[in-house]
Image (cartoon, helix red, strand yellow):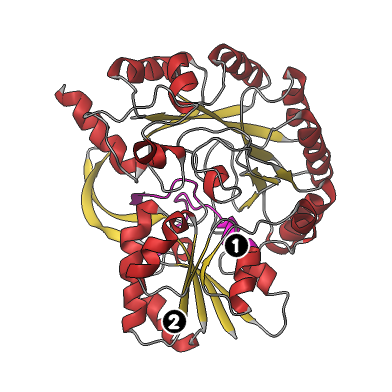
Amino acid sequence: MKILFCNPPWWIGERNVQIGGRSASKWTSGIRAGSRWPHTNLVNSSPDNYVFGDYTPYPFFMGYAASTLQQHPELDVHFRDSIAIRESYESFFEYLMAEKFDLIFIESASPSWEHDSWLLFQIKKAHLGCEIIVTGPITTKADEIMKDNPIAACIKGEYEKGALRVVNGERGVIDFDLLTLEEMNAAPFPYFDAQIAQKYFDGEPLGQQSPQLQVWSSRGCPFKCIFCVWPAVMTGNDPLGDAARKVRHYSADYMEAMITELIERYGYKTVYFDDDTFNLGNRHVEAMCEVMTRIGLPWSAMCRADTIRKDTWQIMKEAGCFGVKLGFESGDQWVLNNIVNKHLDLEVAREAVDEIKRLDMTIHGTFTLGLPGETKEQMQTTRDFIDDLALDSYQLSGTAEIEGTPLANLSTEGGLNGYAGATKDQGYISETDGSIKYLELVKQLQES
């Protein structure tokens, strides 16, 4: 059986933009698998013309599923990340027609679904003789999308075990079948090859060197931010934010073996821990610091400001950590408590920023605007909070509404426990693409 795990092209179009007072032609492309919030943005690349430097996350779920099936010698497993190599639709279909796969796995979510549904029908029209399996957050609508699209199966959640079930003949909706902690730490390392291994890159926090290795040291997050996708729909099943969310950590031995092997094979210069929350507890962080001390490469991580002791930041610094991303989401405490449900004390977060900067580490802050029930004044409070922090960089995006999250289910439920301040009034912008929503918010605020 010949199998393809693919992250297909997602091109929007080309347009002229003003850069430094000059007009330049830029393509808009989408980021799908590997991103918690798939979105579209301007890129330096163009179809079949790869240019290094665009934000390119590694598609973890797809990579682990591909390497899992590769352990079965009777299966001929292939991996194609068209977004990472900036492939055109023409090249993608030439590849499909030349290889003639039996099964094609495609990961999708709300922001890309309209495009991806179109693509599924193009594959069907090409008479390739394959079955299409859909994975990713969009599978929260599995019954609906299977009625209207040429799909043989939908796998909910992380999909190593679900992919094996498909290979063994299951079709239709395949429910959550997550790895146990033991299975996770016995799993093969995620798929990389020479064509794509050095193309993945995230330039934040500042200090990254390429080639950059992106890894997970854990799966899941116990917190229940209203918009957060993966803990709600991929590493757990909690679309309403009212169930327990579990975190599974990779062991230090597993991480050291994986990172060491990939560095030796592909010559990475920095490591980025792209966990939902890397620093969940001092014990795990200290274990990873011991690993990175032995490996000896500079590294960075996605963190929270309030989940480790103050002195643990110092341990991270001494182990080679040069920077962190910190998720703040809002600079308004009421919004954080009553809409986002993040349980982050902003004064504690401010103290963490001061300590991290004292250690001469870089900080990239992440914020969002356009939450349900958030006022214009509260959005301005967030902007003021950003200005008052010693951040090296930050991102401010529109709040994307992606299937499987409490935010996406807010309207259908008529309110959710834990999100008492979240209301969708007439001014609320319902949009799955955070980049598009941000532009609409800016326009709306300028007109008011």
What amino acid type should be assigned to the residue bearing mark 2?
Leu
Q: Which residue is mark 1?
A: 159
- Mark 2 neighbour density, 10 Å: few (under 14) some (14–19) many (20 or more): some
Queried whether the magenta region covers residue 7, the answer comes back as no
From the viewer's side, name the closer residue of 72 and 300.
Answer: 72
The image position of residue 60, as x and y in percent, is 59, 56
Q: In which quadrant will I find the C terminus?
A: top left
Q: Which residue is mark 2?
A: 96
Label 1 amino acid? Tyr
- Residue at point 44% right, 51% down? 54
For the question of whether residue 68 can be seen, the reply is yes
**Secondary element at image label 1:** loop
Q: Position of residue 65 (x, y in %)?
A: 63, 65
- Horizontally, residue 57 falls left or right of residue 245, namely left
**Secondary structure under badge 2?**
helix
From the top left corner, tell me how far across and down residue 358 is, in percent.
66, 17
In this view, 252 is above or below 417:
below
Residue 287 falls in image quadrant: top right
Image check: 7 left or right of 27? right
Q: Position of residue 368 (x, y in %)?
A: 41, 30
Q: Residue at x 60, y 47 (%)?
A: 236
Q: Which residue is at 54% across, 44% downward? A: 232
Mark 1–mark 2 distance (CA, rounded to whole Å): 22 Å
